[in-house]
Amino acid sequence: MIRFLLKGLLRDRSRSLLPFTTVVLGSMLTVIGFSWINGAISSMIESGARFSTGHVKVMSRAYAREADQAPNDLALAGSGSLLAELARDHPDLVWTPRIKFGGLIDIPDENGETRVQGPAAGLAVDLAPGSPERGLLNLDRAVVRGRLPEHPREILLSDGFATRLGIGPGATATFIGATMYGSLVVHNFVVSGTIRFGVTAMDRGAIVADIRDVRTALDMEDGTGEILGFFRDSIYRREQAAGVAAAFNRRHAADKDEFAPEMVSLHQQSSLAQTLDFATQIYSLLLLAFILVMSIVLWNAGLMSSLRRYGEFGIRLALGEDHGRLYRSLIAEGILIGLVGSIVGTALGLGVSYYLQEKGFNLGSMLRNASIIVTDVLRARVTPVSFVIGFVPGLAATFLGKAVSGIGIYRRQTSTLAKEFEA
């Protein structure tokens, strides 16, 4: 039966070319869209985790309520013992302390007077050899000029920020800000190098410094604003992260102090859960729209095909083929077209998706004023679902299109066939 239908479709391209082309385009666009959105979501999660949220994050309860402002006066004290506890209770995660800070970078002239100033957002991390931060932030690859800090009081500046200030490696930069206790701090650093993360929100005016130097400058001895945890394979697992956070919070539930530690997962920070769920809903709606639009096109194609095949259907009914069998054969034709078209469309879509996964698409100019942490180059991400998602609209649309257009078969009355043939 399938062989018979396939021969009929190949020999009469007028009834198969339009549906086939529609299915190929629909399946291809579905695969590309899914892979692109999947890549964008993965990029948001990966970039946000590396630079800001971690897979889980530990803060004081007071700090957590105002985390967007990075209030170091509400930071955790005794971070050394807390890190030891986390490493003991959750050895499947890598733990690293960080301090976010902000202020002015003042560049002096040859007389020690202010030559130029600029606002900067600082990130204090562990830059000691063997620290996980070098890999998490890709610091070795991010260096544009100079080198990573090797001595006390050395910092990294984002390359664009350093260019605007007119300085390079070896220059002296004075940080002006506030300590943990609110007093003014003026601290000199030496720029060891410049970096570019490829994240617009970070590259506008970032400082990266060793956490020991920043603790000294901000009077935060053994203190830290945040402790980030990452799964060792770098893959974020939403349910597992939520379980780790819940277990940690249960152990500290008896401590009612507002400076007691609290752990949150990536999805509980910066409304990321709502953003990711919204993106998923948008794609689901787009997929449904593809199915509906393709079904309407294939329905119209089926109606036109039925008009051209009006005599064929009549002869088949006159020869004794019942309406149900004829209707099912018409649906089988549609499914066959949908299957072949989905295979071709999926193959083409995967080819484009793999290209976008390797090359990506630079959206840096569009993200120039963005505050979200996402890489400038967005890439598609091909997953096992990408290999099958194109069959959903391909098969569903052809089935619906043929099922609706083929209903007209039941309106053909065998009693009138002789008169039709005489005409």
Image (cartoon, rainbow, N blue to C red):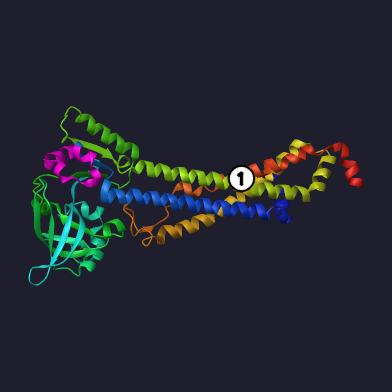
Q: Where is residue 66 in the image (x, y as percent from the top left)?
A: 23, 42
Residue 11, visible in the rendered structure:
yes
Q: Give the range drawn in magenta.
A: 62-90
Q: Quadrant of residue 397?
A: top right
Q: Where is residue 90 in the image (x, y as percent from the top left)?
A: 22, 38
Q: In which quarter of the image is residue 254?
A: top left
> In this figure, what is the number of numbered marks?
1
Q: In this view, does 110 lie to the left or right of 235?
A: left
Predominant secondary structure in magenta? Answer: helix
Residue 81 within the segment the image draws in magenta: yes
In the foreground, 276 or 120: 120
- Circle 1 Cα neighbour tier, 10 Å, few/some/many (<14 / 14–19 / ≥20): many
Residue displayed at 53% across by 57% down? 348
In the foreground, 391 or 55: 55
Residue 377 within the segment the image draws in magenta: no
The residue under label 1 is 397
